[in-house]
Image: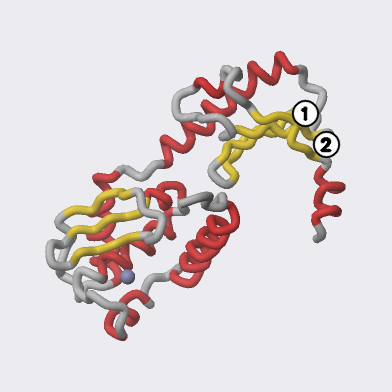
Amino acid sequence: MSENNLQKNSEVRVESLFVENSPVAELPGIGEGDIIVIRSKRRKKNISAYRQGGKIVVSIPSRLSKADERAVVPEMIAKIRAQEESRTFDESLLATRIHELLTQFAPEVIQRPTSATWRLMHERWGSCTSVDGTIRISTRLQRAPGYVLDYVLFHEGIHLLYGDHGQGFQDLLARFPNGATSQAYLDGYEAAEDLLRPPVLGS
Ligand SMILES: [Zn+2]
């Protein structure tokens, strides 16, 4: 579908981008430009909010007044934040989950992680230091489907036995039931990140 068609069919346009005077911008954790409000002609009553490329997009009916917009947008943002909060996988469960996955799919791996923690990592999905048994998982996976997180946990768990991605490693990894789908999710995520990443200026 061409970009033109997309515009015509969706009947949406970016109406406003909140800036420093907006009450929304003062909410903790929300900076300028993080929220986009779309006024949709097609939308009659419903208001929806979702994440897109690190921003929160709130879609409202085009006839909603500015005053109503000011009231309703912070509410929707709070809802999204609450949803994300509840979906964030408890860090203390990461090591337990690795144990469960290894027990179920790769009983040959008798090693267990000494620690498994979330880490802000943009270049990798996970990492394992087999000498001390520590595993780190990218915080980008906190919003991923459960099977994708499992796939990465299983991958790093196997590294407790195999340091490389050789045949022994691959044979064990292949036992994960949703491997291809999980890999596709990770590849798609990375491709989208590359597209949405702002160009680096200077330096
Ligand atoms: Zn690896």
Which quarter of the picture shows residue 161?
Answer: bottom left
Residue 59 percent location from the top left of the image: 70, 33
What residue appears at the point 26 percent right and 65 percent down from the top-left corner?
A: 157
Give, as a three-letter code, the residue at label 1: Pro
| Outermost residue, top side | 67
Compared with 196, 18 (above or below) is: above
Compared with 105, 76 (above or below) is: above
Residue at mark 1: 61
- Sort mark 2 into few (<14), some (14-19) or many (20+) by Cα contacts within 10 Å: few
Residue 153 percent location from the top left of the image: 32, 61
On residue 43, the disc is none
Query: In the image, is 99 to the left or to the right of 197?
Result: left
Residue 185 percent location from the top left of the image: 51, 62
* In-front residue for pair 77/112: 77
Instruction: Name the quarter showing ligand 1.
Output: bottom left
Which quarter of the picture shows residue 130?
Answer: bottom left
Q: Distance between the residues labelled 2 and 1?
A: 7 Å
Which quarter of the picture shows residue 149?
Answer: bottom left
On residue 42, the disc is 2
For marks 2 and 1 on the same chain, the one whose residue lies earlier in the sequence = 2
Task: Look at the numbered disc 1 and give the secondary structure of its residue.
Answer: strand
What residue appears at the point 71 percent right and 29 percent down from the top-left corner?
A: 16
Give, as a three-letter code, the residue at label 2: Arg
- Sort mark 1 into few (<14), some (14-19) or many (20+) by Cα contacts within 10 Å: some
